């Protein structure tokens, strides 16, 4: 059987020196783990287009997509994921959580205090290295 491999964009959203982290809900896979908002790239969709769509759907905000960080491929027990992270900023809207169970703005140095989805750890380490 072919293993499932999902391709996912995610947003490292910055505001006033802080970064947004979002907690998955109890009913999602990887329940209650922290992640960067985003989601699966749909067929024919560009990565930046996907990210903008997901941020509207999940949080009701419009984002400007900035520089990419290094994509990460990770194998979970049930599937593989490739994450395509981009540094982003909110250009309009107030965040309303439509899917996540919590969110928090943290200084980059404190992000690892959260229980992250495993695939995100290299992204956080690369991001922290920018400072
Ligand atoms: N958005 C996002 N997803 C992540 C991150 N890290 C990580 O392992 N993932 C995984 C969790 C999900 O399996 C997948 C993203 O899928 P999704 O958010 O569009 O869909 P979902 O969990 O509702 O899954 P599904 O029920 O539709 O299969 O990537 C991250 O930082 N952000």
Image (spheres, grey):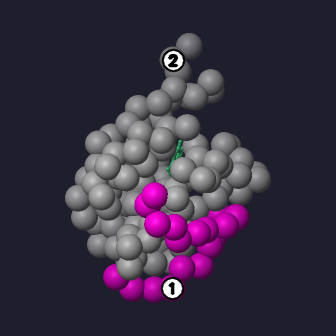
Q: Position of residue 112 (x, y in %)?
A: 54, 50
Q: Position of residue 92 (x, y in %)?
A: 39, 85
What residue is drawn where x is 51% and y is 67%?
106
- Choose between 63 and 54: the one closer to the eye: 63
Q: Dot 1: what SS?
A: loop
Task: Tell me the residue that label 2 is attached to.
Answer: 2
For label 1, count other residues whose C-alpha is less than 10 Å away and answer few (under 14), some (14-19) or many (20+): few
Question: Residue at the bottom extreme?
Answer: 93
Q: Viewed as shown, does residue 67 lie left or right of 4?
A: left
| Numbered mark located on residue 3 in the image | none
What residue is drawn where x is 59% and y is 79%?
96
Looking at the picture, does residue 37 appear above or below residue 83? below
What residue is drawn where x is 45% and y is 86%?
93
* Membership of 94 in magenta stretch: yes
Mark 1 within 8 Å of ligand 1, using the beta carbon:
no
Rounded to the nearest whole Å, what is the CA distance between mark 2 and mark 1? 41 Å
- Choose between 27 and 20: the one closer to the eye: 20
In which quadrant will I find the C terminus?
Answer: bottom left
Task: Tell me the residue that label 1 is attached to.
Answer: 94
* Nearer mark to the viewer, of 2 and 1: 1
* Membership of 121 in magenta stretch: no
Where, by quadrant of the figure, is residue 65 drawn? bottom left
Question: Residue at the top extreme?
Answer: 1
Looking at the picture, does residue 13 appear above or below residue 83? below
- Choose between 62 and 87: the one closer to the eye: 87
For label 2, count other residues whose C-alpha is less than 10 Å away and answer few (under 14), some (14-19) or many (20+): few
In which quadrant will I find the N terminus?
Answer: top right
Could you tell which of marks 2 and 1 lies nearer the N-terminus? 2
Q: Viewed as shown, does residue 21 lie left or right of 125?
A: right
Question: Residue at the right extreme?
Answer: 26
Q: Position of residue 88 (x, y in %)?
A: 33, 67
Numbered range of the magenta stretch: 91-109
């Amino acid at each position: 059987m072919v293993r499932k491999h999902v391709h996912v964009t995610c947003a490292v959203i910055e505001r006033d020196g802080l970064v947004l982290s979002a907690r998955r809900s109890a009913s999602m896979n990887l329940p209650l783990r922290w992640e960067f908002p985003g989601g699966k790239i749909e067929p024919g969709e560009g990565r930046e287009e996907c990210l903008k769509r997901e941020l509207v759907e999940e949080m009701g905000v419009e984002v400007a997509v900035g520089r990419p960080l290094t994509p990460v491929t990770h194998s979970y027990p049930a599937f593989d994921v490739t994450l395509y992270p981009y540094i982003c900023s909110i250009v309009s809207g107030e965040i309303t959580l439509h899917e996540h169970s919590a969110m928090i703005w943290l200084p980059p140095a404190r992000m690892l205090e959260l229980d992250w989805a495993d695939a995100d750890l290299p992204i956080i380490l690369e991001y922290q290295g920018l400072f």
